[in-house]
Image (cartoon, rainbow, N blue to C red):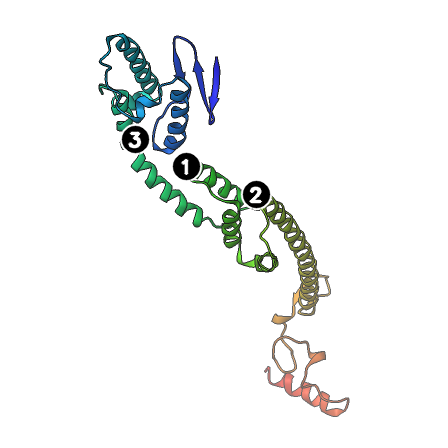
Amino acid sequence: MQQCFLGINVAMSFKRLRLEYALEGSSKYIAWKDSMEVVLDDNGLKEFIEVDVPKPTDTAQVDAWKKKTTKCRRILLEGVKDHIVSSPHGKDSPYLMWKVLTDLFQSKSNQRKLALIDKLRNIKCENGDSMPRYLKKFTQCRDELGSVGVTVDDEDLVSLALLGIPNNWHSYQDSVNGQEKLPGWERLWSDLVQEEIKQNTRDKSSSKASDEENCTLAAKVKKEKEKGSFSKSSFSNDGKKVDKLKVRCFRCHELRHYATNCPKKKSKNGSVEGFECEALASQF
């Protein structure tokens, strides 16, 4: 026959009882302790861990006492992993065996409780976290606290989750805080996921508009560059491109323009010829 107590499978028969998932450390000590008490109580042996049951004086009851004591000891030994067996092994009674295990793991369990409570209070939505991933941190920590005997109310879980969401969610926080009653955990999960979808949709629309604007601006800059580079160049008679920055005017001997576009060129009178003659004479 096989039964399940608090998530721990227990294989039982008339000859033998064995825990499929035995105690291996302080992380699940509370759950193991509760399950073991149920198993012992189901077998009529719980009193042997609550008090040190003395050997009866009536010889007729000694045999029954020995059988129960032996069975209780076997259940305790088979309920822990091999590396823990050495702690209760050799104790005279089930009560002393239970006390050793309690003293060994109860204090560690209390320390773990405090560590998990602190962990729960400091959960934040980190960069790159989606809402389901962020909220899952709370459910995992809540389950860990449950394994050490600490129950977290949904209201506390909701409050902590609202405190840990990013600052750019302040409008959603204000809307929730304005309600007479905080939503339940399941409702909060659904609302936060829906809000994340809305924000992602808005961000994508804004990003698309920004990309289109950037493309338009880039095209405009490219067109202006092409126009500017053409104005700074010309073509020679044989069709080759000539850089105007290197062209020298034969009138004023300055760079970047031809004589026909010389800024020192006079009006259409005799002064033009005089200027040209002076420019030519200066070359000799």
What mark, if any, has residue 132 been given in the picture?
A: 2
Query: Which residue is located at x 59 percent, y 45 percent?
Result: 189
Q: Position of residue 21 (x, y in %)?
A: 41, 22
User: Tags 1 and 3 in contact by the CB under 8 Å rule?
Assistant: no
Which is more N-terminal, label 2 or label 1?
2
Which one is earlier in the sequence, the residue at label 2 or at label 3?
Answer: 3
Front residue of this view, candidates 126 and 213: 126
| Mark 1 element type | loop
The residue under label 1 is: 149
Tell me the CA gap for discs 2 and 3. 38 Å
* Image side of residue 141 versus residue 55, left or right: right
**Do callouts 1 and 2 mark residues in contact (Cβ within 8 Å)?**
no
Q: List x then y, in percent, for residue 194.
A: 65, 48
Question: Quarter of the image containing the C terminus?
Answer: bottom right
The image shows residue 17, relative to residue 117, as above or below, that is above
Eyeballing the image, is 220 above or below 97? below
